[in-house]
């Protein structure tokens, strides 16, 4: 049975994979009717509940991948096979599925892009991170272009530089760009796509407490990311003055990026 939307269902961890020094993936032998780009809410009783992208998806199995950086994710990192966590969802909308696609992930944003890559037909994949230890799925997707800020793996530089080069190459046909990662990176990608008159879809991230539009913490302009998004297209992004300039704290207060 799929997870009920608004009541966490306690599921047993079936497998744990260490993806990098900072990232782990938790697998669950359970069906989940989820589109690429949608998210789930993960609950640890007595600790907290957080949104997570679905990073692996099969008929009777799904997983999410997380970066251990705070109390909640440090607790997740200590869990073992057989332990349980609460899952509800999925929530939000999903990416469209189109041909001649370029998928760009930045840092932990790559977790949101993996099921999209699996659903697309031979997309170009550009994956960037600060360094090798922060790079996700470089063994899972062997043909992708990788960049690191410090040059410790793949090409030294940024995903935006690679995108610019690919779009200038007349032998390469790109009709749509999908992206998830740091918002400043995504803003540059959207601007590049606008310049080249190419469609773009981005997965936005904000603090979320509910997942279905009640708490209001994930607002960007007049949009509620958990129900209007998290996926937004070029037209919508171009009509968001806050995109790439402002974010919101856990309290909901708007601050500059």
Image (cartoon, helix red, strand yellow):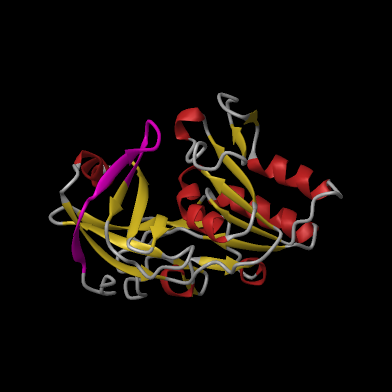
Observer-nearest of 71 and 15: 15
Residue at image position (77%, 46%) is 166
Query: Which residues make up the magenta segment?
Result: 8-25
Specify whether 105 is left or right of 6.
Answer: right
Residue 23 x %, y % = 37, 39
Question: Which residue extends farthest right?
Answer: 170
Residue at image position (18%, 42%) is 80
Residue 59 x %, y % = 37, 64
Magenta span has 13? yes
The answer to whether any part of residue 62 appears in the image is: yes
Image quadrant holding the N terminus, namely: bottom left
Residue at image position (50%, 48%) is 110
Q: Is residue 207 above or below residue 144?
A: below
Residue at image position (28%, 42%) is 16
The answer to whether any part of residue 68 appears in the image is: no
Occupied quadrant, residue 165: top right
Question: Which residue extends farthest front?
Answer: 59
Observer-nearest of 93 and 123: 123
Specify whether 34 is left or right of 87.
Answer: right
Occupied quadrant, residue 159: top right
Residue 208 x %, y % = 35, 62
Residue 3 x %, y % = 27, 70
Q: Main secondary structure of the magenta part?
A: strand
């Amino acid at each position: 049975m799929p997870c009920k939307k608004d009541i966490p269902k306690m599921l047993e961890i079936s497998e744990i994979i260490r993806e990098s020094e900072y990232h782990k993936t938790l697998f669950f032998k359970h069906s989940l009717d989820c589109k690429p780009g949608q998210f789930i809410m993960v609950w640890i009783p007595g600790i907290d509940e957080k949104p997570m992208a679905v990073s692996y998806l099969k008929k009777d199995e799904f997983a999410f991948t997380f970066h251990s950086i705070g109390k909640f994710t440090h607790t997740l990192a200590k869990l073992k096979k057989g332990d349980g966590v609460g899952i509800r969802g999925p929530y939000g909308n999903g990416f469209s599925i189109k041909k001649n696609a370029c998928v760009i992930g930045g840092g932990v944003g790559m977790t949101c892009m993996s099921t999209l890559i699996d659903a697309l037909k031979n997309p170009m994949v550009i994956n960037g991170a600060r360094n090798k230890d922060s790079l996700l799925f470089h063994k899972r997707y062997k043909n992708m272009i990788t960049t690191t800020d410090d040059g410790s793996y793949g090409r030294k530089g940024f995903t935006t530089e690679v995108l610019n080069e690919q779009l200038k190459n007349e032998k390469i046909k790109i009709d749509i760009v999908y992206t998830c990662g740091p918002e400043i990176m995504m803003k540059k990608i959207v601007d590049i796509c606008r310049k080249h008159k190419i469609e773009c879809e981005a997965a936005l991230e904000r603090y979320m407490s509910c997942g279905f539009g009640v708490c209001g913490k994930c607002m960007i302009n007049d949009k509620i990311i958990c129900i209007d998004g998290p996926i937004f297209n070029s037209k919508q992004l171009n009509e968001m003055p806050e995109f790439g300039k402002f974010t919101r704290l856990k309290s909901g207060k708007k601050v500059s990026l």
